Image (spheres, rainbow, N blue to C red):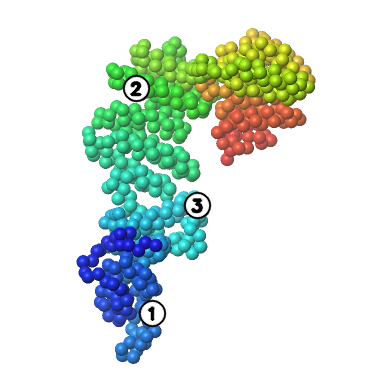
């Protein structure tokens, strides 16, 4: 227990002679003269940090005085009158507050912060001032207790539950009984102290935990106002560090989705103010703000807001000129890479739809705009693709260099450039040792692999992992006879391993898998019927369809056009291969990978048709594929017994 005055510095230090014992002062508490009691309490307040162990014996008396009652005393006074029969003594407010302050410090030394806080709140700002008491262990400990209680109760109110302060037992009840208005006053004074000290991170942490969106807004406005008042001397690096902390905390530490969304909106507004600030903000700070703003808007699902920032950066040479503008354009392209790396294909496609392409198709877009509205009604698809370029910059004249920047942004977002870089890197830096597979194959043959298909299956899978994404399948090509020893589902996995090895190699996918793919109707004859599918076998064919899905769906930055072509090819086989559960299995998994996260209701319904068949093998793949298509959409009841025909119906299912 703390027993030194250094641990709890009095707010009102006394210059009087030190007191060796508090017994005389404690005796005065039972006097009938309020002035004597007030004097004794004032002296006790100055020595309580050293003599608290003696004062602790009179805690009931101190609490009684603080509450305006009499001190309990069964002893007869000098006139022979029992204390109980004396007239009630009325103590003035300063006396009661001093008694509460003394009792609060005793409870503090007894390590009962909730009781100490309760009495400190009654003692008034004269005895419990968090500004003047800064640095005092007593004040800091009680402020922490007040913040903890306030945060827990506010969070419980936000969640609409009866959650209590997790202290357990009587202490929990005592914490819940504290006056909320007085707790709020202490916490708000703590906010003011944070403003004065410039510790905005601390204030934001409390506001986030207490679920106070109003306080988050106040803190961010105060942060920007202080920076703006500083003028050219403002430290915007510190401002952005605080906003970065707020963004990280809001996105990772707040469990409530509603409050997290509200907080992110406030943070995005603050970042937008820095991003659009005057010339007083350095260009480096603005670029930093742009990066954080894009990340924040992406968390909010604001694809148009993200596209606006990228377009402004890509237009930087036109807006700023010179080297600074070139840096802005490069930053815009880097942000495109970051968005693709997030893995949200649907969001990436929406962002790309709001960025002008500035290519050959731009002239066609302008001509279509000049047509009457009636002639354009049939040009827009059901998914609203015709609205993709209704943004701010299609008709803005740009230099050839600027157009190249916009074309490159589309190449990064939907053109498969990131997957090409990944494929090139893995190919050039592959250190896979061919002799590993050679020795493994030899060792397995010596152990009688011919009689154990499981070992052969393991070897083929090991080869796929060893050369994943490198396009190095030379070992399999040199040992085709060994590979053909696989049978049944091992043959399915062996063929699918080709997709692992050639992951993201979309340009040659059909050529590589052509020997294994099942026959299909000619593409140039829309009236041709799909070849009849046998109900037996099909392991190599099913594995090849799965491999095709792996190649196009393994990287979030693969070419969107080629991925859609592969998805259409796989869906064609999905619809026409119900007779063979193995081919259906591979086609369903391939469709799930190529339509990953698209929430395409038409694809979902095709998979559900397969799910409702009597095949457990095909149904398993269909259910997995439905999960891949609807991942992140919130459609938890997609496997209901009715087909989903519209977006409105999907919303009803989700609700």
Frontmost residue, 311 versus 388 = 311
Neighbour tally class for label 3: few under 14, some 14-19, many 20 plus, Cα within 10 Å: few
Q: Is residue 580 left or right of residue 322?
A: right
Q: Select label 3 or label 1 by which is in front.
A: 1
Q: Quadrant of the C terminus?
A: top right
SS assignment at label 3? loop
The residue at 36%/46% (across/down) is 202
Q: In the rendered image of this protein, does residue 400 appear above or below residue 497? A: above
Q: Position of residue 239 (x, y in %)?
A: 31, 37
Q: Position of residue 181 (x, y in %)?
A: 37, 58
* Residue under pointer 3: 160
Frontmost residue, 272 versus 454 = 454
**What is the CA distance from the residue labelled 1 to the residue labelled 2?**
77 Å
Taking the view exactly as shown, the residue that stands out farthest to the left is 15
Q: Position of residue 472 (x, y in %)?
A: 59, 14
The residue at 43%/16% (across/down) is 408
SS assignment at label 1? loop
């Amino acid at each position: 227990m703390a027993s030194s005055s250094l641990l709890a510095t009095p707010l009102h230090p006394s210059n009087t002679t030190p007191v060796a014992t508090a017994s005389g002062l404690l005796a005065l508490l039972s006097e009938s003269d309020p002035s004597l009691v007030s004097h004794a309490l004032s002296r006790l307040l100055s020595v309580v940090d050293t003599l608290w162990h003696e004062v602790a014996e009179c805690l009931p008396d101190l609490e009684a005085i603080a509450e305006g009652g009499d001190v309990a005393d069964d002893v007869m006074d000098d006139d022979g009158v029992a204390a109980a029969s004396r007239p009630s003594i009325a103590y003035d407010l300063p006396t009661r507050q001093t008694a509460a302050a003394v009792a609060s410090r005793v409870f503090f030394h007894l390590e009962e912060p909730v009781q100490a806080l309760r009495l400190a709140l009654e003692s008034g700002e004269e005895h419990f001032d968090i500004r003047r008491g800064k640095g005092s262990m007593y004040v800091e400990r009680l402020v922490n207790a007040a913040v903890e209680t306030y945060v827990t109760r506010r969070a419980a109110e936000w969640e609409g539950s009866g959650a209590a302060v997790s202290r357990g037992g009587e202490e929990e009840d005592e914490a819940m009984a504290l006056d909320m208005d007085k707790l709020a006053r202490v916490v708000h004074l703590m906010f003011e102290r944070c403003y004065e000290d410039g510790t905005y991170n601390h204030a934001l942490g409390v506001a986030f935990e207490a679920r106070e969106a109003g306080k988050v807004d106040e803190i961010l406005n105060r942060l920007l106002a202080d920076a703006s008042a500083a003028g050219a001397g403002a430290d915007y690096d510190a401002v952005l560090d605080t906003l970065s902390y707020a963004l990280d905390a809001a996105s990772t530490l707040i469990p409530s989705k509603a409050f997290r969304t509200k907080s992110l909106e406030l943070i995005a507004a603050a970042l937008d103010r820095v991003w659009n600030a005057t010339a007083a903000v350095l260009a480096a700070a603005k670029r930093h703000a742009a990066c954080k703003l894009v990340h924040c808007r992406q968390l909010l699902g604001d694809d148009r807001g993200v596209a606006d920032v990228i377009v402004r950066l890509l237009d930087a040479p036109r807006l700023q000129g010179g080297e600074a503008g070139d840096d802005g354009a490069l930053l815009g392209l880097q942000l495109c890479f970051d968005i693709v790396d997030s893995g949200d294909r649907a969001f990436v496609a929406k962002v790309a739809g709001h960025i002008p392409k500035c290519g050959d198709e731009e002239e066609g877009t302008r001509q279509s705009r000049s047509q009457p509205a009636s002639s354009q009604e049939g040009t827009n698809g059901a998914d609203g693709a015709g609205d993709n370029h209704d943004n701010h910059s299609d008709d803005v004249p740009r230099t050839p260099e600027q157009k190249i920047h916009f074309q490159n942004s589309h190449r990064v977002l939907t053109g498969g450039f990131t997957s090409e870089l990944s494929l090139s890197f893995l190919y050039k830096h592959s250190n896979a040792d061919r002799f590993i597979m050679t020795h493994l194959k030899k060792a397995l043959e010596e152990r009688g692999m011919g009689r154990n298909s499981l070992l052969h299956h393991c070897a083929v899978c090991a080869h796929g992992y060893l050369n994943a994404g490198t396009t190095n399948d030379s070992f399999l090509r040199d040992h085709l006879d060994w590979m053909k020893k696989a049978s049944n589902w091992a043959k399915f996995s062996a063929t699918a391993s080709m997709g692992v090895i050639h992951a993201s190699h979309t340009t040659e996918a059909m050529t590589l898998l052509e020997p294994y793919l099942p026959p299909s109707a000619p593409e140039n004859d829309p009236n041709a019927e799909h070849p009849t599918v046998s109900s037996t076998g099909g392991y190599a064919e099913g594995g090849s369809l799965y491999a095709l899905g792996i190649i196009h769906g393994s990287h979030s930055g693969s070419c969107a056009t080629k991925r859609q072509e592969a998805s259409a090819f796989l869906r064609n086989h999905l619809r026409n291969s119900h007779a063979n559960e193995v081919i259906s299995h591979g086609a369903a998994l391939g469709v799930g990978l190529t339509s990953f996260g698209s929430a395409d209701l038409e694809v979902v319904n095709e998979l559900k048709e397969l799910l409702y068949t009597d095949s457990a093998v095909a149904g398993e793949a269909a259910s997995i594929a439905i999960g891949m298509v609807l991942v992140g959409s919130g459609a938890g009841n997609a496997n209901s017994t009715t087909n989903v025909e519209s977006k409105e119906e999907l919303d009803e299912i989700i609700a």
